[in-house]
Amino acid sequence: MALEQIIFWSLILVAGFSAIMVVVSRSPITSALYLILNLFCLGGFYLTLNAQFIAIVHIIVYAGAIMVLFLFVIMLLNLGDESKLRERIDWKTYISISISVAFFVELYYILMIQTPIPVTKLHVNSAEVGTVEYLGKVLYTQFIFPFELTSILLIAAIIGAIILAKKKFTI
Amino acid sequence: MIPIQYYLLFAGFLFSVGLVGVLIRRNAIVVFMCIEIMLNSVNLTFVTFSAYLGDATGQIVVFFVMTVAAAEAAVGLAIIISLFRNKQTLNINEINLLKW
Protein backbone atom coordinates (compact mmCIF):
# COMPACT_ATOMS: atom_id res chain seq x y z
CA MET A 1 0.00 0.00 0.00
CA ALA A 2 1.38 3.34 -1.00
CA LEU A 3 2.13 6.05 1.52
CA GLU A 4 -0.61 8.21 0.03
CA GLN A 5 -3.25 5.59 0.73
CA ILE A 6 -2.01 4.98 4.27
CA ILE A 7 -2.29 8.71 5.01
CA PHE A 8 -5.74 8.90 3.40
CA TRP A 9 -7.25 5.99 5.31
CA SER A 10 -5.79 7.00 8.65
CA LEU A 11 -7.14 10.54 8.13
CA ILE A 12 -10.56 9.04 7.34
CA LEU A 13 -10.45 6.93 10.50
CA VAL A 14 -9.50 9.81 12.79
CA ALA A 15 -11.83 12.34 11.15
CA GLY A 16 -14.83 10.00 11.18
CA PHE A 17 -14.25 8.97 14.78
CA SER A 18 -13.85 12.57 15.96
CA ALA A 19 -16.96 13.70 14.06
CA ILE A 20 -19.02 10.97 15.71
CA MET A 21 -17.56 11.85 19.12
CA VAL A 22 -18.59 15.50 18.63
CA VAL A 23 -22.18 14.35 18.32
CA VAL A 24 -22.31 11.74 21.07
CA SER A 25 -20.12 13.17 23.84
CA ARG A 26 -21.93 14.53 26.88
CA SER A 27 -20.11 17.73 27.77
CA PRO A 28 -19.69 20.61 25.29
CA ILE A 29 -15.99 20.94 26.16
CA THR A 30 -15.32 17.38 24.96
CA SER A 31 -17.29 18.08 21.80
CA ALA A 32 -15.24 21.22 21.14
CA LEU A 33 -11.93 19.40 21.60
CA TYR A 34 -12.99 16.58 19.27
CA LEU A 35 -14.13 19.20 16.76
CA ILE A 36 -10.63 20.70 16.80
CA LEU A 37 -9.22 17.23 16.03
CA ASN A 38 -11.71 16.90 13.19
CA LEU A 39 -10.69 20.28 11.77
CA PHE A 40 -7.02 19.32 11.79
CA CYS A 41 -7.86 16.13 9.90
CA LEU A 42 -9.73 18.17 7.29
CA GLY A 43 -6.61 20.32 6.92
CA GLY A 44 -4.74 17.08 6.23
CA PHE A 45 -7.27 16.20 3.53
CA TYR A 46 -6.69 19.56 1.88
CA LEU A 47 -2.96 18.86 1.91
CA THR A 48 -3.48 15.49 0.22
CA LEU A 49 -5.50 17.34 -2.43
CA ASN A 50 -2.58 19.73 -3.15
CA ALA A 51 -4.50 22.72 -1.75
CA GLN A 52 -1.73 24.04 0.50
CA PHE A 53 -3.00 27.57 0.96
CA ILE A 54 -6.56 26.46 1.74
CA ALA A 55 -5.20 23.99 4.30
CA ILE A 56 -3.22 26.67 6.15
CA VAL A 57 -6.08 29.18 6.06
CA HIS A 58 -8.46 26.49 7.29
CA ILE A 59 -6.26 25.70 10.28
CA ILE A 60 -5.77 29.40 11.11
CA VAL A 61 -9.41 30.41 10.76
CA TYR A 62 -11.12 27.39 12.30
CA ALA A 63 -8.75 26.04 14.92
CA GLY A 64 -7.28 29.45 15.65
CA ALA A 65 -10.29 31.74 15.65
CA ILE A 66 -13.64 29.97 15.62
CA MET A 67 -12.80 27.23 18.12
CA VAL A 68 -11.23 29.73 20.52
CA LEU A 69 -14.50 31.66 20.30
CA PHE A 70 -16.47 28.48 21.06
CA LEU A 71 -14.28 27.58 24.02
CA PHE A 72 -14.52 31.13 25.39
CA VAL A 73 -18.31 31.06 25.20
CA ILE A 74 -18.46 27.65 26.90
CA MET A 75 -16.18 29.00 29.63
CA LEU A 76 -18.19 32.23 30.04
CA LEU A 77 -21.56 30.52 30.29
CA ASN A 78 -20.35 28.24 33.09
CA LEU A 79 -22.73 25.35 32.53
CA GLY A 80 -22.30 23.82 35.92
CA ASP A 81 -25.34 21.59 36.05
CA GLU A 82 -25.34 19.02 33.28
CA SER A 83 -28.62 17.61 34.51
CA LYS A 84 -30.69 20.44 33.03
CA LEU A 85 -29.38 19.56 29.60
CA ARG A 86 -30.01 15.82 29.87
CA GLU A 87 -30.47 14.36 26.42
CA ARG A 88 -33.32 11.96 26.04
CA ILE A 89 -33.52 9.17 23.50
CA ASP A 90 -37.02 9.06 22.11
CA TRP A 91 -38.76 8.41 18.81
CA LYS A 92 -37.47 11.69 17.36
CA THR A 93 -33.90 10.45 17.78
CA TYR A 94 -34.60 7.29 15.80
CA ILE A 95 -36.37 9.25 13.05
CA SER A 96 -33.44 11.69 12.77
CA ILE A 97 -30.88 8.91 12.61
CA SER A 98 -32.84 7.01 9.98
CA ILE A 99 -33.22 10.16 7.85
CA SER A 100 -29.46 10.73 7.94
CA VAL A 101 -28.67 7.09 7.19
CA ALA A 102 -31.08 7.22 4.24
CA PHE A 103 -29.31 10.34 2.99
CA PHE A 104 -25.93 8.60 3.23
CA VAL A 105 -27.21 5.48 1.46
CA GLU A 106 -28.57 7.66 -1.35
CA LEU A 107 -25.17 9.31 -1.74
CA TYR A 108 -23.48 5.91 -1.74
CA TYR A 109 -25.85 4.70 -4.44
CA ILE A 110 -25.30 7.79 -6.59
CA LEU A 111 -21.51 7.91 -6.23
CA MET A 112 -20.52 4.27 -6.10
CA ILE A 113 -23.12 2.30 -8.03
CA GLN A 114 -25.06 4.40 -10.46
CA THR A 115 -22.78 6.75 -12.39
CA PRO A 116 -19.06 6.15 -12.73
CA ILE A 117 -17.32 9.55 -12.55
CA PRO A 118 -14.93 9.90 -15.48
CA VAL A 119 -12.32 11.81 -13.42
CA THR A 120 -10.04 9.29 -11.76
CA LYS A 121 -6.90 11.09 -10.64
CA LEU A 122 -5.70 14.52 -9.61
CA HIS A 123 -5.46 17.07 -12.40
CA VAL A 124 -1.94 17.73 -13.63
CA ASN A 125 -2.31 21.42 -12.72
CA SER A 126 -3.60 20.75 -9.21
CA ALA A 127 -0.29 21.51 -7.48
CA GLU A 128 -0.10 24.83 -9.30
CA VAL A 129 -3.75 25.73 -8.62
CA GLY A 130 -3.36 25.41 -4.85
CA THR A 131 -0.56 27.96 -4.55
CA VAL A 132 -0.94 31.48 -3.21
CA GLU A 133 0.06 33.08 -6.52
CA TYR A 134 -2.57 31.32 -8.60
CA LEU A 135 -5.39 31.73 -6.08
CA GLY A 136 -4.50 35.37 -5.48
CA LYS A 137 -4.51 36.09 -9.19
CA VAL A 138 -7.95 34.54 -9.61
CA LEU A 139 -9.35 36.10 -6.43
CA TYR A 140 -8.25 39.64 -7.26
CA THR A 141 -9.25 39.62 -10.92
CA GLN A 142 -12.17 37.35 -11.58
CA PHE A 143 -13.76 37.35 -8.13
CA ILE A 144 -13.02 40.91 -7.04
CA PHE A 145 -16.68 41.90 -6.60
CA PRO A 146 -17.64 39.02 -4.26
CA PHE A 147 -14.39 39.64 -2.41
CA GLU A 148 -15.39 43.25 -1.75
CA LEU A 149 -18.89 42.18 -0.72
CA THR A 150 -17.26 39.92 1.86
CA SER A 151 -15.99 42.99 3.70
CA ILE A 152 -19.56 44.28 4.07
CA LEU A 153 -20.57 40.89 5.48
CA LEU A 154 -17.75 40.98 8.02
CA ILE A 155 -18.60 44.55 9.08
CA ALA A 156 -22.23 43.54 9.56
CA ALA A 157 -21.18 40.51 11.61
CA ILE A 158 -18.88 42.59 13.83
CA ILE A 159 -21.51 45.23 14.51
CA GLY A 160 -24.21 42.61 15.09
CA ALA A 161 -22.09 40.60 17.51
CA ILE A 162 -21.12 43.66 19.53
CA ILE A 163 -24.67 44.98 19.77
CA LEU A 164 -26.13 41.59 20.65
CA ALA A 165 -23.57 40.85 23.34
CA LYS A 166 -23.57 44.34 24.85
CA LYS A 167 -27.16 45.37 25.28
CA LYS A 168 -29.38 43.84 27.90
CA PHE A 169 -32.44 42.72 26.01
CA THR A 170 -35.57 42.31 28.05
CA ILE A 171 -37.90 39.59 26.94
CA MET B 1 -4.14 7.12 -6.62
CA ILE B 2 -7.30 7.69 -4.63
CA PRO B 3 -10.54 7.84 -6.64
CA ILE B 4 -12.64 10.97 -6.37
CA GLN B 5 -15.61 8.99 -5.09
CA TYR B 6 -13.91 8.25 -1.77
CA TYR B 7 -13.46 11.92 -0.97
CA LEU B 8 -17.04 12.73 -1.98
CA LEU B 9 -18.45 9.81 -0.01
CA PHE B 10 -16.50 10.77 3.07
CA ALA B 11 -17.77 14.34 2.77
CA GLY B 12 -21.27 12.90 2.58
CA PHE B 13 -20.57 10.87 5.71
CA LEU B 14 -19.43 13.99 7.57
CA PHE B 15 -22.55 15.82 6.40
CA SER B 16 -24.76 12.98 7.67
CA VAL B 17 -23.03 12.98 11.06
CA GLY B 18 -23.52 16.75 11.34
CA LEU B 19 -27.16 16.35 10.33
CA VAL B 20 -27.72 13.77 13.07
CA GLY B 21 -26.11 16.14 15.58
CA VAL B 22 -28.27 19.09 14.55
CA LEU B 23 -31.40 16.99 14.80
CA ILE B 24 -30.85 15.08 18.03
CA ARG B 25 -28.79 17.34 20.32
CA ARG B 26 -30.51 19.78 22.70
CA ASN B 27 -27.47 21.88 23.64
CA ALA B 28 -27.36 24.99 21.46
CA ILE B 29 -23.54 25.17 21.41
CA VAL B 30 -23.23 21.55 20.24
CA VAL B 31 -25.80 22.27 17.52
CA PHE B 32 -23.56 25.10 16.35
CA MET B 33 -20.55 22.78 16.26
CA CYS B 34 -22.49 20.29 14.15
CA ILE B 35 -23.36 23.08 11.71
CA GLU B 36 -19.62 23.75 11.46
CA ILE B 37 -19.06 20.07 10.62
CA MET B 38 -21.63 20.29 7.83
CA LEU B 39 -20.03 23.46 6.41
CA ASN B 40 -16.65 21.75 6.48
CA SER B 41 -17.91 18.70 4.64
CA VAL B 42 -19.21 20.93 1.85
CA ASN B 43 -15.82 22.68 1.78
CA LEU B 44 -14.17 19.29 1.34
CA THR B 45 -16.28 18.54 -1.75
CA PHE B 46 -15.43 21.96 -3.21
CA VAL B 47 -11.69 21.42 -2.74
CA THR B 48 -11.95 17.87 -4.09
CA PHE B 49 -13.58 18.96 -7.33
CA SER B 50 -11.19 21.88 -7.60
CA ALA B 51 -8.16 19.59 -7.33
CA TYR B 52 -9.50 16.87 -9.59
CA LEU B 53 -10.65 19.27 -12.31
CA GLY B 54 -7.68 21.66 -12.08
CA ASP B 55 -9.95 24.69 -11.61
CA ALA B 56 -9.40 27.35 -8.94
CA THR B 57 -13.07 28.34 -8.59
CA GLY B 58 -13.80 25.69 -5.98
CA GLN B 59 -11.01 26.89 -3.71
CA ILE B 60 -12.17 30.51 -4.09
CA VAL B 61 -15.67 29.50 -3.03
CA VAL B 62 -14.16 27.81 0.02
CA PHE B 63 -12.78 31.21 1.04
CA PHE B 64 -16.24 32.73 0.97
CA VAL B 65 -17.72 29.78 2.87
CA MET B 66 -15.06 30.24 5.55
CA THR B 67 -15.93 33.95 5.80
CA VAL B 68 -19.62 33.16 6.17
CA ALA B 69 -18.80 30.49 8.77
CA ALA B 70 -16.74 32.94 10.82
CA ALA B 71 -19.46 35.60 10.68
CA GLU B 72 -22.11 33.01 11.54
CA ALA B 73 -20.12 31.74 14.52
CA ALA B 74 -19.58 35.27 15.90
CA VAL B 75 -23.22 36.35 15.57
CA GLY B 76 -24.59 32.98 16.67
CA LEU B 77 -22.47 32.83 19.80
CA ALA B 78 -23.48 36.41 20.63
CA ILE B 79 -27.13 35.34 20.31
CA ILE B 80 -26.44 32.34 22.56
CA ILE B 81 -24.85 34.57 25.23
CA SER B 82 -27.77 36.98 25.05
CA LEU B 83 -30.27 34.12 25.33
CA PHE B 84 -28.43 32.58 28.26
CA ARG B 85 -28.53 35.91 30.08
CA ASN B 86 -32.29 36.08 29.75
CA LYS B 87 -33.43 32.47 30.04
CA GLN B 88 -30.60 30.82 32.04
CA THR B 89 -30.68 27.80 29.75
CA LEU B 90 -29.14 26.49 26.55
CA ASN B 91 -31.74 23.81 25.94
CA ILE B 92 -33.20 24.53 22.53
CA ASN B 93 -36.50 22.95 23.55
CA GLU B 94 -36.99 25.64 26.19
CA ILE B 95 -36.02 28.49 23.87
CA ASN B 96 -39.38 28.95 22.17
CA LEU B 97 -39.81 32.73 22.07
CA LEU B 98 -40.59 32.77 18.36
CA LYS B 99 -42.91 29.79 18.46
CA TRP B 100 -46.59 30.58 18.25
Image (cartoon, coloured by chain):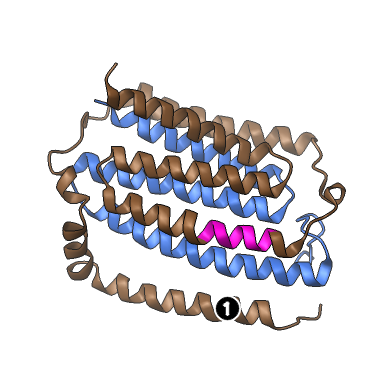
Q: Nearer the viewer, residue A64 or A83?
A: A64
Residue stretch rendered in magenta on the structure: A66-74
Question: Where's residue A6, x and y in %?
Answer: 35, 23
Q: Which quadrant is the C terminus of chain A positioned in?
A: bottom right
Identify which residue is drawn at 66% across, 44% down. A30
Residue B53 falls in which quadrant of the image? top left
Whether residue B2 is in magenta: the answer is no
Q: Which quadrant is the N terminus of chain A positioned in?
A: top left
Left or right: B92, with A139 as reference point: right
Query: Identity of the amino acid at label 1?
Result: Gly
Question: Where's residue A125, x and y in %?
Answer: 13, 44
The dominant secondary structure in magenta is helix
Residue A65 lies, with reference to residue A23, above or below; the image says below
Give the colour chain A carries in the figure. Answer: brown
Residue B90 lies, with reference to residue A150, above or below; the image says above
Whether residue A68 is in magenta: the answer is yes
Question: Where's residue A19, x and y in %?
Answer: 55, 38
Residue A95 lies, with reference to residue A141, above or below; the image says above
User: Mark 1 falls on what kind of element?
Assistant: helix
Residue A20 falls in which quadrant of the image? top right
Toward the top, the furthest residue is A1
Identify which residue is drawn at 79% across, 71% down. B85
Residue B25 lies, with reference to residue A77, above or below; the image says above
**Which residue in the structure is indicated by mark 1?**
A160
Q: Residues within 10 Å of mark 1 (few under 14, many from 20)?
A: some
* Chain to which the residue tagged by mark 1 belongs: A
Chain letter, blue in picture: B
